[in-house]
Image (tube, coloured by chain):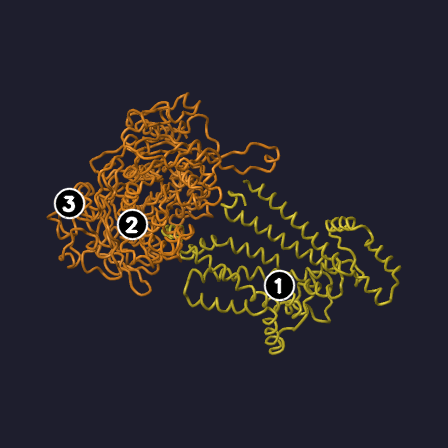
Amino acid sequence: MSLLEVNDVKIAYRMPGDDVHAVNDVSFSIDEGDNYGLVGESGCGKSTLAKSVLGLLDDNGEVREGSIEFDGRELLELSERDWQSVRWEDIAYIPQSAMDSLDPVMTVGAQIRQAIRKHRDVSKAAANERVAEVFEMVGLDPDRTGDYPHQFSGGMRQRVTIAMALALDPDLLIADEPTTGLDVIVQDKIMDKLIEIQEEIDSSLLMITHDVGVVAETCDEMSVLYGGKVMEQGETDRIFRSPTNPYTIGLKNAFPEVDEFDEQAISIPGSLPDLTEEPTGCVFRNRCPFATERCEDGHPPLDEAGGQLSACYYTDRADELREEAADPATWGIDVRDERDRSGGVGDTILETRGLEKWFKQPQGILEDLRGAEPDYVKAVNSVDLSVHEGEIVGVAGESGCGKSTLAEVIAALQERTGGEILIEGTPVDDLLGESTKEFRSRVQFIFQDPFDSLNPRQRVRAAVGEPLKIQGHDPETIDRRVRETIEDVGLKPAEKYLDQLPTQLSGGERQRVAIAQALVLEPTLLICDEPASMLDVSLKANILNILREKADERDIGIVYISHDLASLTQIADRLAVMYLGRIAEIGATEDVVTAPKHPYTASLLSASPKTDPDVDRQRVLLPGEPPNPVNLPEGCNFAPRCPKADETCRGEEPARATFADDDHEAACYHPVEDVESELLERYAAAREEEVGEIVESELTL
Amino acid sequence: MSFRRFLIKRTAIAALLTLIAVSVIFATLRLLPADPFSALVASGSLTPAEVEQIRAMYGLDDPIYVQYFRYIQNLFTFEFGISLTQQRPVGEIIVPALVNTLVLLLPALVVTAIVSSLAGMYAGWNRGSWFEQSSIVVTTVFRAVPIFVTGIFLLIIFSYGLGWLPAFGMRSPLANPQGYVATFASVDFLKHYILPFTATVLFYSGDFLMLARNSVVERKGSEFLMLHRAKGLSEMEQLGRAGRNSLLPLVTYFALRTGMLFQGVITLEVVFAWPGIGRALVQAILNQDYPTVQAAVFIMALAVIVMNLTADLAYAKLDPTVEAGDV
């Protein structure tokens, strides 16, 4: 018998007006000790399902039909009191955003202790012992149980929530996007820890994620959800090797791999179906390039297709569909000519020389009076970067590496503290001289979050027209150019969108409005700070395509900032990797990705999960976290975490061109030759040693 | 930043503010067109020479900076001078009045802060319930109606109508107790106490109720409460955590309200003929008794500053993240 059995569950949310049918007839089961994945984009119902298993649906949500059995017990009939004893004792939950999931005014130790003492009648001291134990299991310092959540970094907070989930040895762990919002290296370490522990305590795992790669690497079985329906279900390996459902095929194609740099990103056009009524046809039919009249005829049943279950009328043509789906034209995307990605083609648009942005640290009044030199956080530290016409330069790095500050300094949204910025050969100070108009018409910025960066009360017409108005154009020109630009970013026909408010648009549409807003002035330089990170994979590809197209068509230079290496490799001509304010490595994207020279770049690249089930990737267990940027060590910033570091590295900071091969430069004395043996195995060995020490110290106690 | 540094910095700022406040009081009174004695000349009862003598007696003929320093010096020792109209030290007038006011208002404020906040948290947790809606309506009505009107209604119903409670003062005309214990720990005092106390509680209940309700409503959808719920905490335990996370605005408001306590209650003291500091101030202003006015205003300013400081410190203690930033 399975541990968890979900049978024909229907969940609906009561909304003013209409009910939203978030989940419709979903069934799946998890065996003891198994890892199960629920994959899908936002709005597919995966989180709703997870919450219903814990009885945590919002007040307006209810399970209308079906059954959820756990260990032979029907969960849906439990009273609130019975629920309270099932929660955490039997089923524990790892929440999505570790940043907000911990009670800010309670020490982390107290929060875990609370979970223990709620279910077990143990003394405070015994509970504290257990807290220290689980802290050690997840690799946190047991002395820090008395700290508050804000004293931990994002990755460490996620470890705290994992520790909390482990506290009572639950039979089932539900992890709801446990690594969203974390950097790849941290994500890799957390996933490694989670899987390791889960195998150790022999519990089952329900993993909910939009990240196809994470599921491919961790789960035995999975379901692909779309619009509240299961599209495909079965063994993970099988599904990724030969998906039979057009949606799964599309999702897999849209999910970029780090080393696929010559392929055009494929997106799924259109937007999510309206769920205010129960689906009458296939939920995917309005976005599916293979849909026929037959698909109107009720959602297809989940049928056996090549070893897995798939909800499609055309599973018998799966091989054919897969082949066709690999061609962007099938999805209505204009096929681009393969471009020359050598970079450095046209004139230089942007050049920075020794650019610096240092933030002064607050110090005491006494120190001020004594005239002591304050500490600085060197967010951007002597960065040389150039961007040419029609070129996209990607800037990659973990959060806190200074990449966003770099973007804002270049866009003159923040003052620089040193160095020079030249736009088309003119120093920025000259451009900014009298007013910012001249500068702003040449340099535009696209922000990360399309939900916050648009004024909620401004209609699309006004939002896109505003920059033109500031520049003093007449109303007719404004109207004409607004229409042109809106259609240019793929919002066709313009009439449909001009009078809409941001709330009426989907996430992808909003970000396109933001791009239109930036493009309407026909700038020569566009700076994009993670423009696609808030969007679903199928929409992400679309944004990347638009940017690539504009760079090629209009000869715009683009600085593309992101922590997502896979999308960077798809879009960027050249790639710069930043670590603690410095560029560690820079070069043509292909060179950097295929032959990374800096150990940090190599680690970053190896940390990206792979969707291909046949690849057995070694995880990147890079020790420690980036050091405190205030008191950086002498020498190379990366030396404290680098297995190859020696005295030279600790003594003197390597110049950027320490390794140089044409355009490819890396600030490293000992460039990497073989990633596997030089880095990954050493990381793993260092960690074994560490674990060994802990075990030993426990034995001696 | 350590808590100690935070404490030192905040206290220094509070001290500076106090100095500024007393200087403003000093300067404002000197700017008035006449001094209290010129009226005596105009009325013909004293000659200019005699007035000069009196001014010298009060030290008013010294240069202004000497007066200023003496004034500051005296404030440090809580020496407020001699009342011009009652010929006794200002302290003797102000202190009992202050005590009477505090005895009335502090317990009222504490009770309403606790009861209304708890009710507000419960209301916010059960959003849309009958309790939430009626509690908001009732407390808003009492907040909107001026406190003296509520007071008069209470008097009409309970004193004149039902005759259960006395109508004014804080003791019966015949009672003449000595010392604080005898004054405040008697049934007679309690009877006089109930009505003004109730009026104050009702008046301030709306503020705390709405504040508590709103911050609990804000917390309600938050991720950490979801995690608390997933851990198996009961409904009331979850509300407890939501309440703990909503304390900040409440404590701040409580501290600020306490600091401004003396300003809002003058009408209340007049309606109930409560011998408090509000009434003392009104009388002193009418009589142009400047030392008393100075002292009363100083105490009010000091209360605001001290309670602001308390609010800041409570903030740092209640919210562990405050210490981390430079506030």
What chain is the yellow one?
A: B
Residue A324 badge: 3
**Residue beneath disc 1:** B264
What chain is the orange one?
A: A
Q: Are marks 2 and 3 in contact (CB under 8 Å)?
A: no
Chain under callout 1? B
Q: Determine the CA span between mark 3 and mark 1.
A: 78 Å
**Residue beneath disc 2:** A488
In the rendered image, which quarter is residue B191 located in? Answer: bottom right
Q: Amino acid at mark 1?
A: Gly
Residue B233 at least partly seen: no
Residue A252 image position (x, y, % from top left): 22, 43
Please check whether the numbered discs 3 and 1 fall on a single chain. Answer: no
- Secondary structure beneath label 3: helix
Q: Amino acid at mark 3?
A: Glu
Please check whether the numbered discs 2 and 3 fall on a single chain. Answer: yes
Chain under callout 2? A
- Location of residue A633 with respect to B221 vertically, above or below: above
- Secondary structure beneath label 2: helix
Q: Are marks 3 and 1 in contact (CB under 8 Å)?
A: no
Q: Determine the CA span between mark 1 and mark 2.
A: 62 Å
